[in-house]
Amino acid sequence: MKNKNFKKIIAGGLSIMMLASCTDLINDEKDSIVRANEGGGGFTPGNPTELLVSAYKDLGAYTDQANIYALGQHPTAEMIPPTRGVDWGDNGVWRTLDQHTWDATHSGIINAWNQLNQRIYKCNEIIASNPSAAEKAEAQFLRAWNMFHVMDYWGQVPFREVTDGVDVNPRVLTRSEAFDFVMSDLNEALSGLENLGPAALNPKASKAAANFLLAKLYLNKAVFTSSTPAGPYNHDAADMAKVIEHVEAIEADGYTLSDDFFGNFSADATTETILNSNEGTPQNRWMMTLHYDQNPSGWNGFTTLADFYDTFSDEDVRKGLPAAADGTDMSGIGYGFLIGQQYNDNGDPITDSRSQNLLKFTRDVTLAGTPTDKGIRVIKYHPATAGKYILMRYAEAYLMKAEAMMRAGDSAGALAAINELRSKRGASTLSSLDENSLFEEIGREMYWEGGKRTTEVRFGKFTTGTGTLIQDDYTVLYPIPSPAIVSNPNLTQNDGY
C-alpha cells in the first residue's frame, strides 16, 4: 500500500546487478546451493555441529538493507528509496521495488531467492548428518524460518534432497504443500527445543521462537492456502484460536511488553527479544537512512512517507525522542522519526555540506531527482545504544494475538489489548477497533522491522495504494527469478510475469 501525496517518477529499465549499494556492510554470498561430491552422486554427511553454527551465522543476511529485507519492506507504504543525484540509483533496482514494477531479472529478487534456498539446503544437510536431537530440532526451526520466507514471497518452494545428484531438478512444493511442510517441521521441533525466556540476547532457536513462527503461520494461513493469492481471505476461527494458543505459550515463557519502546533495540533489551541474529549488526538500519553530515556519517538513503508519519499522535513515544546533543559521541541523533533541523553532538545546527544550507529533513520527498535534505529519516536502532539485530520481538506476537481475537469475533478483547499496548507507548486509548485501525496500530509498533509487505497482503492493502505503478493482484507474489526458471523446469513462473 503506497498512499503517497507526491508525484512518482517513472523508473527506467533495470539490469541484473547487485542490489546492495557499494556501501553494503554484508558480505556477498560465497556458498553454493549444493555441496557436490566427486562423481556427482550420493551424499557425504558433514559435521552437524559446525553446519549448525554456520546456519546461525547465515541469519546475518536478514540484517542487510537489500535482498530479503528489501523485499519485505520497500514495496510498502512505510518506506521510499529516493535517488539523490547518482546516489541510490543502482540502475533503478530500488525504484522498481517501490513502484511494484519488478520483473524476473531483478537482482534483489534473484539474490534473496538464492540466499534463502541455500539456507534451506544447508539445514537439509544438518538433518541428514546424524545430528543430536537438539541439533535436529534447531535445524528444523531454521529450515522452517527460511522456507517461510520463500513460501511468503514466491508462493512455491524448490526442495533438493541431499541425495539428489547435481543433475537432478529439485521438486517444487506448492504454497499449500510448503505450508504443511513448515508446520510439520515446527511441530516436530518443538519438543526438542530449549525453553528459553527473555534475554538481551537470544541467538538460538527456542520453544518461544517456534511458537512465534507457528502463530505467524496460522495468522497468515488464509493467505498461504488460498487458491487466489490476492484474496479475499477467509480467516477461520479455529486458525485464530491456534494463533492465540501459540502466543500464550510465548507469554508462559515470561515474555512481556517492554515499558521502554526504543530500549527494545538496545544492548540492554530484555523482555521482548525472542530471537536475534548472532551474525551482523543493526548498523545497516541507521546507515541506510542517516545523512552524510551526521554522526555517524550515513549513506543518505531511505526515508519514510509523510502519510505514514501522520498516523502517529504527538504523545506516542514511538513517534520519536529528540537528540540528547550532550556532547557525547553520537548524541546528535534522535530516536524514531527525524524531521526538521538536525544537530551535531554539541547541539549545534548541522549544515548540509553539499547544499551549504542548514540540514532540515522535510516531509516532502520524491522518488528521483531528490535533494539531499528531503524525507523524514527513521532510527529504531540507535548507533549509540544498539544491540544485536532482532528477528522476532514479543510485541509482534502480542499484536498477532490481538488480531486473531478481532478476526475470531472478540473485538472487545482485541480493543483492550491494543489499548494496553498504546498505554505503554504513551498514546491515548482508542474507543473502537476495526481492521483499518488495527492495521495502523501494527504499523506504529512494527515500522521498518521488515515484515510490512506480509501485513499489507493479509489486510488486502498491498495493491490498493495510489503510489504504485502496477496495482494488479499478481504482484502479491514475486516472480520466480529467471535463472531459477532456466535451471529447474519443475518451477512454473507465477501468473502475470
Image (tube, grey):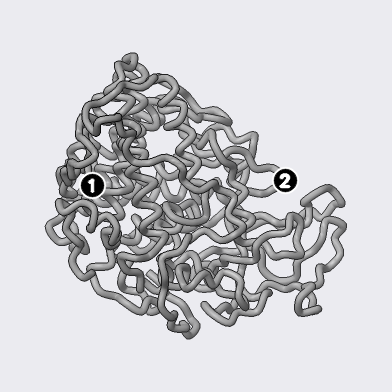
With 215 as the anchor, is 268 left or right in this view?
right
Of badges 2 and 1, nearer the viewer stands 1
- In the image, what residue type sits under mark 2? Ala
Residue 322 visible to an observer of this rendering: yes
Say which residue label 2 marks. Answer: 384
Q: Quadrant of residue 246?
A: top left
With 481 as the anchor, is 47 left or right in this view?
right
- In the image, what residue type sits under mark 1? Val
Real-space Cα distance between discs 2 and 1?
40 Å
Say which residue label 1 marks. Answer: 157
Locate residue 463, reporting x and y percent.
Answer: 31, 71
Residue 430 visible to an observer of this rendering: no
- At 47% from the left and 83% from the top, the residue drawn is 9
Q: Secondary structure at mark 2?
A: loop
Locate residue 203, reporting x and y percent.
Answer: 50, 30
Locate residue 472, reporting x and y percent.
Answer: 25, 74
**Total labels drawn:** 2
